[in-house]
Image (tube, rainbow, N blue to C red):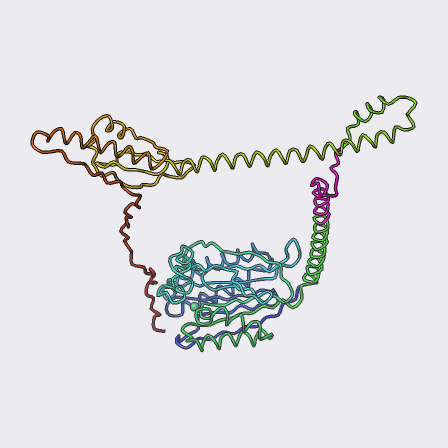
Amino acid sequence: MTILRSGSATHVGQVRSNNQDAPLVAEQSHLYGVADGMGGHQGGEVASAMAVATATEHTGERSLEALKHAARIANRAIFEKAGSDPDLHGMGTTLVALQLIEGPEGDEIAWINVGDSRVYLLRDGELRQLSHDHSLVEDLVRDGRITAEEAKVHPQRNILTRALGIDLDVDVDGASILPLAGDRFLLCSDGLFNEVSLDQMSAVLRRLVDPDEAASELVRLANEGGGRDNITVVLVDVIDDGGRSAAIAEAQAAAIAAAEARAAAERAEAEEAARQAALAAQETEPGPNTVEVEPEPAVAFADRRSSLPDAQDDYAAVGTDLYADLDRVRAKRVTWRVLAFVAALLIVAGVVVGALYVSQSGTYHVRVRGEMVSVYRGQEGGFLGIQPSFEYDMPFAIEDVPEPFRSQLISGKEFSSIGAVNRYQLNIQSAIDATSTTTTSTTTTSTTSTTRLATTSAPASTVPGVTTAPAGNATTTAPGTTRPPG
Ligand code: MG
């Protein structure tokens, strides 16, 4: 059987002239709640009082559905009262309530919520909110438009999206939870959590065992924090859960023991597998003192036996052993032959690649680059990913080169050494000089051409321009929020 104990405190706060909050503590029916009324004149007080009274009156059945139904009845009653009394027009109220109910698995705690009062649960030292606020800022937080911290000081934080008494019908949130000994439920109006942080609330709830004392301390902290609204706190402690938490602890211990046993078995299995793998590796790797063993084919074994003379049947076992030894030696030889073959293959491949590389690095090609005739080291198009490197430009432009050299250069020409390139260049230069001499021979004497043999030089390096963007951390400034005067 579940046993509850409660405590409560309510306070007008430091600013308001009247207290429109109403605590609900009905221990006989295991019903607890908080209503936070709103509306001019006496409207707020009337609405919250009506919510508490109607809920108490209509929760005899002790089920989640009955609790929700009671809230809907209260809604209708407040709505009709507001419509019939001009002084109470527009009044409404929040309502959070919880009740010990009988569920399919025994006692449960059912809770409901309409508006922005809250239900929290402290379990295993952790305080978490069970209800969701029906408020504009909650919607903004849920949509990611403001943070939970910004919601606390948002100028429109008092705007509710749902309340009792505003419309003919209302949706009521609710759920039920299995209570465990040590659970502490906190029901409160926004006058508490707008002034006191979650950590502060949690610390008080963990520190003060007596629920009345803890409720009073929370109210004191809210007043200390500003007391800009009415403050109401109702605490419900689960003193006894009828052995449920003990049974759960027992089941958890059994589950942990089973998991540990499973883990130990898996470890042993893995160790055995590793041992077997190591043995297999030893058997397959022929060491200096090991002999390759291959499975003996049953047919071959039988054939060999039958091939032995009948008179030697008695020696069949000895003969079989000899054949087995022979096979082992053969297998060993085969293994070493395979290894030797692979090694030889690798060496040959290495030699071929090396030779190709050496031959490539000693190769040159000459081709036209813009107006110039350029010499490159390496094959045109590259070799095994190594691109040819620019060496130098020949000291004449392509337009000065006569045929057939010009066509050869335009097609690209390859040489096996830098000496061959130099000879080719000399030939071109001679042809150019000859052409020049022919065209000017009528007026000038021929001069000996001096051909400058180009030496290998590094190409001019180009340093690309670097555009440096100014580094900086973009900061997002949160929209300004102003705490309204209390
Ligand atoms: Mg309030």
User: Which residue is at a point 44% across and 37% down the rendered structure image?
Assistant: 357
Quarter of the image with the C terminus is bottom left
Determine the quadrant in which ligand 1 lies. Answer: bottom left
| Span colored in magenta | 271-294
Q: Nearer the viewer, residue 198 or 89?
A: 198
Q: Position of residue 284 (x, y in %)?
A: 70, 39
Quarter residue 325 falls in = top right
Q: Nearer the viewer, residue 327 or 262?
A: 327
Q: Nearer the viewer, residue 337 or 452?
A: 452
Quarter of the image with the N terminus is bottom right
Please determine whether, in this image, residue 410 is positioned above or below residue 82: above
Q: Position of residue 444 (x, y in %)?
A: 9, 33
Horizontal side of 371 relative to 104 (left or right) equals left
Q: Position of residue 476 (x, y in %)?
A: 34, 61
Please determine whether, in this image, residue 310 is positioned above or below residue 32: above
Horizontal side of 116 relative to 6 (left or right) equals left
- Count of picture labels: 0
Horizontal side of 326 relative to 139 (left or right) equals right
Report if residue 51 lies within the magenta region: no
Q: Position of residue 125 (x, y in %)?
A: 58, 67
Report if residue 280 lies within the magenta region: yes
Horizontal side of 205 relative to 390 (left or right) equals right
Quarter residue 393 falls in = top left
Q: Nearer the viewer, residue 60 or 320?
A: 320
**Residue that sits furthest to the left in the current view:** 443
Please determine whether, in this image, residue 268 is positioned above or below residue 445: below
